[in-house]
Amino acid sequence: MSQSSSRSLFLLTVPLLVTTVLTLLAPIVFLFRTALYAPEVSRGLPRFVAALEADTAAVPREEVFRVLAEDLGRRKETFEHGIVIKPIRHQDLELWKMLKGILRVLPEDPSIAEISSWQRWFSEHDSRWESANTWRRLRRVIQPVTDFYLLEAMDLKRDGENALVWQEKEKQLFLGVLLNTLEIGGVVTLLCLLLGYPLSLYLASLSSRTARILFLFVLLPFWTSLLVRTYSWILLLQREGVVNGMLAALGLVSEPLPLMHNRFAVYVTMTHVLLPFMILPLFVVLRNIPSPLTTAAASLGASPWRSFLTVTLPMSVPGIAAGSLLVFSIALGFYITPALVGGSEDTMLSQLIALNVNSLLNWGRAGALGVILLGTVMVLFLSVTFVLLSRMRWNPLAGELR
């Protein structure tokens, strides 16, 4: 291939590379930046941050107190102090309350206020300003690069000695939600596999024309929005819904069953939504299994069940892995469905991310939860890829991986 042809082929890939960077790599970089970078305090109180970093004493000298008062005074005049110290609220609520208390009594212009000792003035309003522990925590939260949000997303924190410890029992929330998310994703993936494999096997055994016609019914849910499908299940499963109405009409129940706002509703709805994503890769792999292999197994005396276990099932492992990975990855990021049909015990990680972005405005925590979710998917993807590659072998005669 000539050099000009190679250059032309490379130029054809440039739009794809640019799109990949803009739609995949850039959001990931922004996600990590949000989780690890909180520069609001260092930007809003630059003189105080510089003075505190230069002062290594356990309780800093008078100059640091004066600079803190002046920096807070300037931000108070421009109504920016709330934005400046907001990250401190997320990381250390007690410190945030102390700063808010100082802001309420701070003179209009601290630089010209007739105060002989700012250190004594701070201590008179709150004795905790004389504590070395207060300043140790303050030095930690003013750093622009922080691991606080990532640790919080794993129910961890740093104690006064900067060692990793578990959060208090009443504050441990995120690991439980992560386990919830993994459990729901795993069960939904298993249900999709149990329902999708027999259907994919049946479609693969049909003629091409019949399989194409029936495959339209598999693709039909894609023509309906996720919200419509979720609300349809709400109509079916609610207390006065179709399912309870039919059971009552048949005399099978004396009162409506609790089919909504619980884990059962989440499983049913998510399985219905994600089932096509399992069938698609399974059908492709099963369709490409050479039929003479099963015929040969039968001619050697293998029963249909033994032929399936020794020939069809092992050769369909790539389809099982691809479908399971696809369904599980999508299930981990579900938000609308568990929010509408689930209960308080069925909260998923994506719901917490949306809560922190839309209501709590805690972008650092939302970014950290997103990193945890991304890391979970990446570990799963790499694990499945490693397993699939370990099952392959290089055939030097054919010149390909098998």
Image: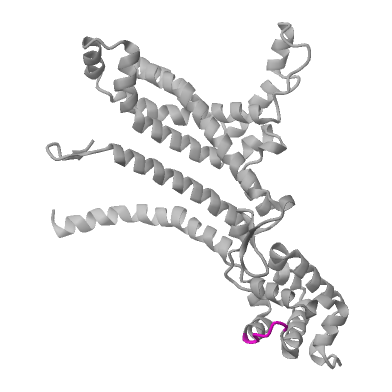
- State whether residue 334 appears in this view: no
Near-viewer residue (253 or 81): 253
Q: How many marks?
A: 0
Q: Image check: 177 left or right of 359? A: left
The range drawn in magenta is 54-59
Near-viewer residue (72 or 62): 62
- State whether residue 116 appears in this view: yes
Residue placed furthest toward the left: 397
Residue 297 position by quadrant: top left
Q: Is residue 58 magenta?
A: yes
Q: Is residue 395 above or below residue 82?
A: above
Near-viewer residue (186 or 160): 160
> Where residue 255 sits: x, y (%)?
78, 15
Q: Is residue 43 magenta?
A: no
For image coordinates 66% across by 40% down, the residue present is 347
Q: How is the image coloured?
A: one colour
Q: Which quadrant is home to the C terminus? A: top left
For image coordinates 71% across by 55% down, the residue present is 168
For image coordinates 44% across by 37% down, the residue present is 325
> Where residue 380 sits: x, y (%)?
45, 43
> Where residue 389 sits: x, y (%)?
30, 41
Q: Give the main secondary structure of the magenta stretch.
A: loop
Residue 50 position by quadrant: bottom right
For image coordinates 64% across by 54% down, the residue present is 155
> Where residue 53 sits: x, y (%)?
63, 83
Q: Is residue 89 above or below residue 315?
A: below
Residue 60 position by quadrant: bottom right
